[in-house]
Amino acid sequence: MSLIAEFEIHCEQLPLVSVAAAVPTATLHLELQFAHGPQPLFLLTVIDGRREPIDAALTAADDVATYTHIGEAGDTQRYQAAPAYSLDEQLGGALDDLAELKTLAQTETIIDRIEVMSTGWTQTGWFAHREAFDAFRRFWQRQSEFRLRRLTRNDAPEPAGEGLTDNQREALRTAYELGYFEIPRGASLEEVATELGISASSVSERLRRGQTQLIEETVATMWPPLSESVDRI
């Protein structure tokens, strides 16, 4: 029975971790494009990030050789970047057997989502069976901190919202009850923060990450993709 797993890998040598650390209020989604030579290109989507600090972070990142700003839509920025190092050069000193990782990633496994954090990556992967997942998990537990967020069978999806953390759930519910999502808004971000007893920046991050999680569990999973011609409000 195949499995879907969401997990965190805390390894600061992973690509673009320094960029995520430099723009902590943004969410960075990474794709590795292997069709362009021996080193994969970085395809980076940055949500809730302004271009200037992202450009500065990419310029300062020692694992980025060059980058191109492809475009933007609202607070979402898209980049293509060429790595400064091969994966062997970047990870070789941090991992005891990079060849084993490549084998695990190419055998009975599909990693289809990477979010870059300031301490590593959060990944979502499909595994053909439990043994494939266990081999992947054991490898990363030998190398660094590995934290499993969710593990489900592909024939038994969890209800939308099951991937939310308790803090995200509380922030979303409080903001909703106070009228933060109404048009016009019935409460400000500061008022939600006061109700929760935390800073406005912390509330903003929890709401953003919670909303991203809900979108990924619902409309972002639709196939085929929405037409580019669909009118958006």
Image (cartoon, rainbow, N blue to C red):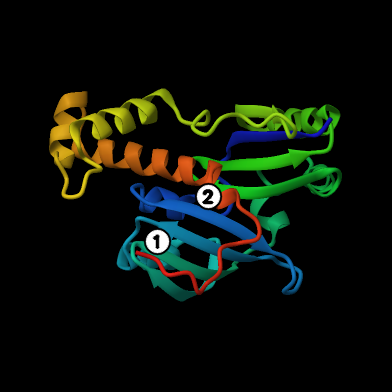
CA distance separating discs 1 and 2: 31 Å
**In the rendered image, the vertical position of residue 189 relative to residue 157, given as above or below:** below
Q: Which residue is pictured at 81% across the width and 31% down the height? A: 135
**In the rendered image, the vertical position of residue 70 relative to residue 187, given as above or below:** below
Give the number of the disc on residue 205: none
Asked whether 57 or 72 is in front, the reply is: 72
Picture quarter with the N terminus? top right
Asked whether 73 or 115 is in front, the reply is: 73
Asked whether 178 or 136 is in front, the reply is: 178
Q: Is residue 23 left or right of residue 66?
A: left
Residue identified by numbered label 1: 57
Which x, y percent locates residue 4? 70, 35
For label 1, the crowd category at 10 Å Cα-Cα, with few meaning under 14, some 14 to 19 and many 20 or more, is some
- Residue 153 appears in view: yes
Image quadrant in which you'd find residue 131: top right
Sequence order check: which comes first, mark 1 or mark 2? 1
Residue identified by numbered label 2: 219
- Residue 197 appears in view: no
Image quadrant in which you'd find residue 187: top left
For label 2, the crowd category at 10 Å Cα-Cα, with few meaning under 14, some 14 to 19 and many 20 or more, is few
Q: Which residue is pictured at 20% across the width and 49% down the height? A: 183
Which label sits in the foreground, 1 or 2?
2
The amino acid at mark 1 is Ala
Q: Is residue 105 left or right of residue 194?
A: right
The amino acid at mark 2 is Val
**In the rendered image, the vertical position of residue 166 relative to residue 13, given as above or below:** above
Q: Indicate the secondary structure of the residue bearing disc 1.
A: helix
Image quadrant in which you'd find residue 52: bottom left
Q: Which residue is pictured at 24% across the width and 41% down the height? A: 201
Which x, y percent locates residue 35? 75, 71
